[in-house]
Image (cartoon, grey):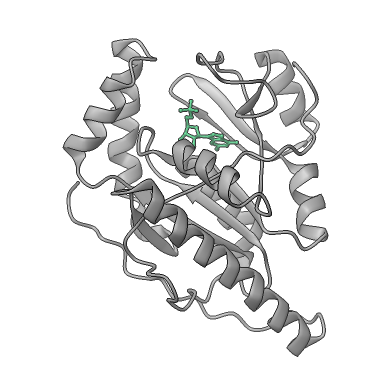
Amino acid sequence: MVGAPGGKARGTGAAGKAAPAGASLPAAANNSRLTVLSGPSGVGKSTVVAELRRRSPEIWISVSVTTRSPRPGEVNGREYYFVTREEFDRMVAAEELLEWAEFAGNKYGTPAAPVRDRLERGLPTLLEIDLAGARQVRETMKDDALLVFLKPPSWAELVRRLTGRGTEPPEVVERRLAVAKEELAAAGEFDVTLVNTSVDEVCRQMVTLIVSLVNRSKSVRKATRGSNPGRSRHHQPADRRAP
Ligand code: 5GP
């Protein structure tokens, strides 16, 4: 692996639909500052993350490890830690990853230690991961994480973005589109759905969500003096129209 995963921020930004500024936060994540951003490949998660990193450096963004090769412009330790399959497998065996998944032929995972460290220090923390990873976080963190799903304005737009990127060979694009179909069908599992019509708008909505989370976390902690309050989940209705 090139460089140890340690805790450099990967920025985020998003735009969407179901969480207008000032909207009350879904009842998930009562006592946590962990937000997970997921959504199909090509929807614009990494653009949103990069913009969030620029605008809101107070939000710590986890840097994943991956076995995929760097794309032009990607920097080891910023977008990802680029590792060999052997190193990735070693990290899995050593239980160093909070979650991990295989995606379109490559492996991706979240180094656990830096995330735990940020959460223990009460810092707003963001993961940008795929559906399988988001499901694992839901499983391990239960309602102590807010799951945000980013969807494209339309299926045609997602195809355009994925094919237009020009960074992957056609067979990889095909695989990513097939996975995207499955991922879009899972939007209802998330607490909030945002539609990426504008990076600026998604970023604003993400910041609003994350700030609400931090504020509520503070007031819940104060009110309960550290006890774990009862949580009632409320799923904001996700837009289930065919993309
Ligand atoms: P890409 O190769 O386009 O950068 O990422 C492919 C997919 O892997 C995206 O959906 C991205 O969100 C996801 N991904 C990135 N890092 C992680 C991670 O640490 N864990 C999981 N489960 N998925 C990740």
Relative to 147, say whether 164 is above or below.
Answer: above
37 vs 93, left or right, is: left
Name the residue: 75% across, 16% down.
2
Quadrant of residue 177 within the rendered picture: top left
Name the residue: 49% across, 48% down.
13
203 vs 118, left or right, is: left
Q: Nearer the viewer, residue 1 or 88?
A: 1
On the image, the x and y values in percent for residue 66 come to 61, 24
Residue at far bottom of view: 223
Q: Nearer the viewer, residue 86 or 54?
A: 54
Relative to 143, say whether 4 is above or below.
Answer: above
21 vs 9, left or right, is: left
Name the residue: 60% across, 29% down.
79
**Image quarter hosting the N terminus:** top right
Residue at far top of view: 169
On the image, the x and y values in percent for residue 68 come to 55, 17
On the image, the x and y values in percent for residue 243 come to 19, 46
71 vs 92, left or right, is: left
On the image, the x and y values in percent for residue 96 come to 77, 36
Q: How many marks?
A: 0
